[in-house]
Image (spheres, coloured by chain):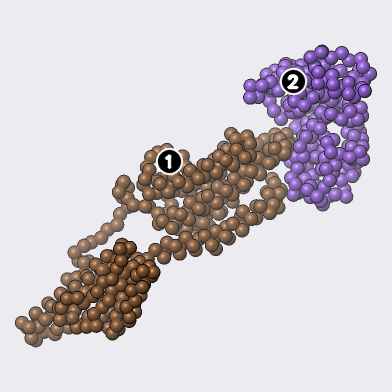
Amino acid sequence: MLQLNNVSYRKSKSDLVNSVSASVHAGDRLTIFGPNGAGKSTLMRLMAGIIEPTGGTITSNDLLKAKNAIGYVPQQLALFNNLTVKEHLRFYRKMAGNNTENFINEMIETLQLKNFWNKQIDELSGGMKRKVNLTVGMIQQPEIVFLDEPFVGVDLAAKHDMLNWLNQLNKRGVTIVFVTHDWQVIHQLADKMWLMESGNLLQETTVDEVVHNRLELPNTSTALHKMISFHRS
Amino acid sequence: MLIIWKSIFKRITTWVLMVLIPIVLGIIIYPMIKDTVSQVSVPITVVDQTDQAITEELLKEIEDSPFQVTKTESLDLRLLSTGEAEAIFVFNDELEANILSGNTDKIVTWYRTENSYVDGLFKEKLASAIMSRVVRAEAASIVSHYRPETEWDEVFKYGLKYFDPRPIFEMKFEHIHSAQNTSSIDSGNQLLFIIMWLYLSMLIGYFTKILYEWRTDGILERLKLLQQTQYYYWSWFIGVLAITYSFSFVAIQLIEVPLNNWAYFIPFGTVLICFLFFILVKKKWSMYAWLISYSVASFIIFLLADWQIIESEWMYLFIPTWLLG
């Protein structure tokens, strides 16, 4: 679905992503894992086509070349604080341009947004804002969705709704790529894992391998070792 | 894209900047500057203890700015020390009789202080008005003496013809570019214009700040991904241009500055430079620092250019100077 060949991204004389080669397949549930500053978000933004690589190539299949095939949910709440939930969804649906009325209604229903329909974003709780952020990021009914720390500040109930919705979509064939430090989310939403540190993709592995201690990391990756060991303990 | 503007107009700050500040500028600053300019007049006091008809006649003749003449019947020298009068002119009780008889000795007493600077012009005008009457009266007396059949009044009026400069001087005003030109814009309007421009750059800076917030919040990335065009930048640019030109149009009606062709590009240039700051300067506060520095420099350069202290091509890098171009 998505093929990365020696993809690099260099900014202000530092390599944020360094010669990454890997591939994402249709229907994957993939998490990019690593310490802060590892280049996870940058790699995801490269794959989503928001920024262009300074080296290497990213090739995609015809499905992803279609307009609105890629959904992106940024880490920040990319919302207009003084517009209502209804205004957001109407605006972005109009921008996306395709007929996704049923899909949007399903999202509203599953994420329980209806009760907050006429509320402004700045009147919503952190969890509700995250739900709206997720809805807007997927409003065009994408084939692949990139989620950057989508569950920060979300309570368990809201997290449950969101995970449930994302897993439903994955079962219908939507590819999910996300970044998080939350092991609970990783367990419930990912099968594959890319381990990153200092802009390098150290290993392509599975959640199962990481959890069950079958993974061998290079000794240089101290931060990753700590993060994984902490989870196992 | 209208919804983006709706989100902007839902902010209180937008209304403060677009409604409250223009009202404050219109109600307080505008009349204050206009009044200050119109009040630049020289207070002169004329004392005529016998309230003679010729006094009114003389004052009417020299009534002209920048003098603000007050007529009283008693002399009060404190007016000079308090600054209420630049100079005091006391008319002789027999002023009219003295003028008609050709006697010009001590008919007006002139009081002034070491701080009186521009009262000399009033003195010259008054002297001229008196002397024209004295000369005509003298001429009428001589003619009446040698030709008794002629009317004294008729000759006196006839003499006016020789004090009217129109047949001698023909004045033509032409605008000629030269280093000797004085300020091209009225000083009050010049100040109002640059205040208006500073306000506009502040307003555009505010809209640019919103663009920064959208960039930081990831809204621009989201729009880019969904739309796959840069249309939202155009929407911002055209919207800000429309607001800026609307405000400029109203302000120009009030200020009445003479416009050249380049002046119409001032709002466009200001929006463009803020947009360039947005593209080139990554941090919001750095953009503010650049914008404020540029605005202050433009303010100074504009005034220096208008006073012809500087005249060089580089001054046109500062947008307000396009008004002088």
* Three-letter amino acid code of the residue under disc 1: Met
Subunit bearing disc 2: A
Task: List x then y, in percent, for residue A156.
Answer: 91, 38
Element type at mark 2: loop
Residue B116 is at least partly visible in this image: yes
Q: Return the mark for residue B60.
A: none
Q: Considering only vertical position in the picture, is B315 above or below A232?
A: below
The residue sitting at 75% across, 32% down in the picture is A67
Q: Hue of chain A?
A: purple
Of the pair A92 and A233, the residue shown nearer to us: A233
Q: Considering only vertical position in the picture, is B141 above or below B214?
A: below
Residue B238 is at least partly visible in this image: no
Circle 2: is it few (<14), some (14-19), or many (20+) Cα within 10 Å? some
Q: Name the residue beneath numbered marker 2.
A: A198
Give the chain ID for the brown colour. B
Which of the two marks, 2 or 1, is nearer to us in this view? 2
Judge from the rendering whether residue A40 lies leftward or rightward of residue A103; answer left or right: left
Judge from the rendering whether residue A201 lies leftward or rightward of residue B266; answer left or right: right
Judge from the rendering whether residue B16 lies leftward or rightward of residue A183; answer left or right: left
**Furthest residue toward left:** B146
Task: List x then y, in percent, for residue B249.
Answer: 52, 55
The residue sitting at 56% across, 54% down in the picture is B246
Task: List x then y, in percent, for residue B179.
Answer: 31, 46
Q: Return the mark for residue B315.
A: 1
Task: List x then y, in percent, for residue B176.
Answer: 31, 50
**Furthest residue toward bottom:** B149
Of the pair A98 and A128, the residue shown nearer to us: A128
Of the pair A46 and A63, the residue shown nearer to us: A46
